[in-house]
Amino acid sequence: MVVEDQFFFRVALRSLVDARIDMEIVGETDSAREAVQLHAQLHPDVTIMDLRLPGGSGLNAIEAIRRQDPRARILVLSNYEGSEDVYRAMEAGALAYLTKDAGGDELVRAILSVHAGKRYLPAALGALLAGRMRGDELTDRELDVLRLLAQGFSNREIGNRLKIAEKTVKIHVSRVLDKLGVEDRTQAAMTAVQRGIVHLE
């Protein structure tokens, strides 16, 4: 099953799969919500999932599918390549993660690996994931502060939005800088975007 909101990318995936005698696409959708319903109806051997979808994120769809079918085998195919994106997808239950610039041969290898119940990560993404798992965890509140910081809000504005004191915001910012290993707010924002902690649309 293919869950992808870009029409031409779905066409490309269908062409790739149709060229093989050992695979077929049994269903496709461009919606996270519909993906959960479709998976329950079709029980596909492998689901190829984008992370950025209308009607909810691909991560939410992965979690919902895995709740209703813990044996579901999901391969993430995304434009996002930050360590946080990879980490969250694997934590949600995906077995593989590829970026959309992956070649057809690698995508086929990943599909076959996932079908066999094995994890598949290209070396570069595996290194990112290892680095992410060695890093200090940001708390939920620190993540909230970091997301607003990356959008250019001042400490006072962040405090107003989160309904916490400006002094408390300063403490959170200091901890965020320390955990990310950066020296200032600008570096924190850049690191957050590079790692996929924050997505600026």
Image (cartoon, rainbow, N blue to C red):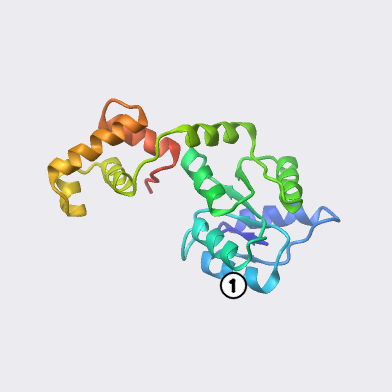
Count of numbered circles on the image: 1
Q: Which residue type carries mark 1?
A: Gln
**Residue located 58% across and 64% down the image:** 65
Q: In screen coordinates, is 7 left or right of 182?
A: right
Q: In screen coordinates, is 135 left or right of 37?
A: left
Binning the other alpha carbons within 10 Å of mark 1 as few (below 14), some (14 to 19) or many (20 upward) gives few
**Residue located 78% across and 61% down the image:** 24
Front in this rendered view, residue 179 or 12? 179
Q: In screen coordinates, is 145 left or right of 72?
A: left
Q: Which residue is mark 1?
A: 37
Residue 31: image location, x then y, percent: 53, 65
Residue pushed farthest top? 183
Residue 21: image location, x then y, percent: 86, 56
Tell me, yes or no, if residue 82 can be seen here: no
Front in this rendered view, residue 46 or 180? 180
Residue pushed farthest right? 21
Front in this rendered view, residue 196 or 16? 196
Residue 177: image location, x then y, percent: 29, 32
Residue 75: image location, x then y, percent: 64, 51
* Quadrant of the image occupied by residue 97: top right
61 lies above or below 160 = below
